[in-house]
Amino acid sequence: MDYPIVKIGRKDRTYPKILKHISDPPEVLYCRGNIALLNTECFAVVGTRAMTPYGQEAARQIVPGLARHFTIVSGLALGIDAAAHRATLDCSGKTIAVLGSGISLITPETNLRLGQDILKNNGLIISEHPGKKPAYKDSFPERNRIISGLSKGVLIIEADEKSGSLITARLAGEQNRDVFAVPGNIFSSKSMGPHKLIRTGAKLVASAHDVLDDYSKLPFIKSPGLSTADPVHSVILAILETHGPLNIDSIIEHSKLGASKIMGALALMEIQGLVTQMASGIFRKTE
């Protein structure tokens, strides 16, 4: 399927309202895909290209809970950016990819399939550059101002001390956006960036709840509550509501539904962001 390129100028009504108010908004956005996402509530997730298994798992665990409430914005780069886009698609969320190159040039080629999947799933790819213009020295910091400029907040998952992701965090602060960071192994260089941000005021994030808690009073943040089309999901949510966080064995015992049914349901609910599994194997209802 062909996805035509739409050119949106700052005076067009479809130009993202939140982006207009940064100090240097792009004059033009070239877009492919669902341009309605430009004026949805967005949240950015970025990080190192050289992610570790820890960073990948952090994205897989945290992003689905955020994607239930936000359009997830990232840079379609290797590593954490790609993991954030993929985690969003896996839970049927919506995502915007901001390119540093021209709108018709997705690099690296290994992310071409991911870009196609974003478009096939009603997502959006944007750039301030036309055609197949290659990225240049300053294009990624320029791209980063759009990533943060579109978003209410930015989450950093793994970054070296001089990572480009910290540029996004700095720009977010200058744009009066919220900055969040996932802590990591103190012996890993990929933790230096997030730890630096946390020391200077970024909110520490261990789950989607830590982000959503900051926005809980906003009208677009809805608690998953007990309403769900799947009766097994309803049973599990009711158990966690009544008894608090529990391990799988306890949930099975309270439910009287059998191990295979509960384990399968919990796996799907975790992807959907309805429940969160903590490090000790305890499940809690996502707030």
Image (spheres, rainbow, N blue to C red):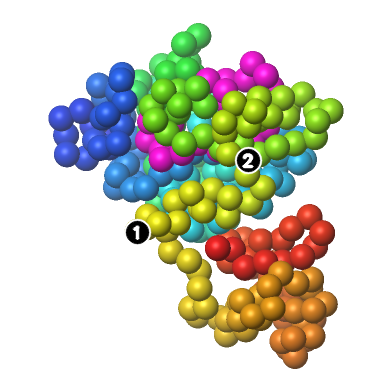
Q: Which quarter of the picture shows residue 262?
A: bottom right
Q: Which residues are magenta?
A: 148-167
Where is residue 61? Give x, y as percent: 66, 52
Question: Among all residues in the image, which is located at the extreme bottom?
Answer: 256
Q: Which quarter of the picture shows residue 98?
A: top left
Look at 63% across and 44% down and name the residue there: 205
Q: Is residue 74 above or below residue 236?
A: above
Where is residue 153? Give x, y as percent: 46, 39
Of callouts 2 and 1, which one flags the residue occurring earlier in the amino acid sequence? Answer: 2
Instruction: Tell me the tag on residue 219.
Output: 1
Residue 21 lies left or right of residue 181; in this view the side is left
Where is residue 80? Give x, y as percent: 63, 36
Instruction: Tell me the tag on residue 33.
Output: none
| CB atoms of marks 2 and 1 within 8 Å | no
Look at 78% across and 55% down and name the residue there: 279
Look at 45% across and 56% down and name the residue there: 216
Residue 164 lies left or right of residue 128; in this view the side is right
Amino acid carrying mark 2 in the image: Leu
Q: Is residue 127 visible?
A: yes
Q: Which residue is mark 2?
A: 204
Residue 179 lies left or right of residue 32; in this view the side is right
Q: Is residue 82 visible?
A: no
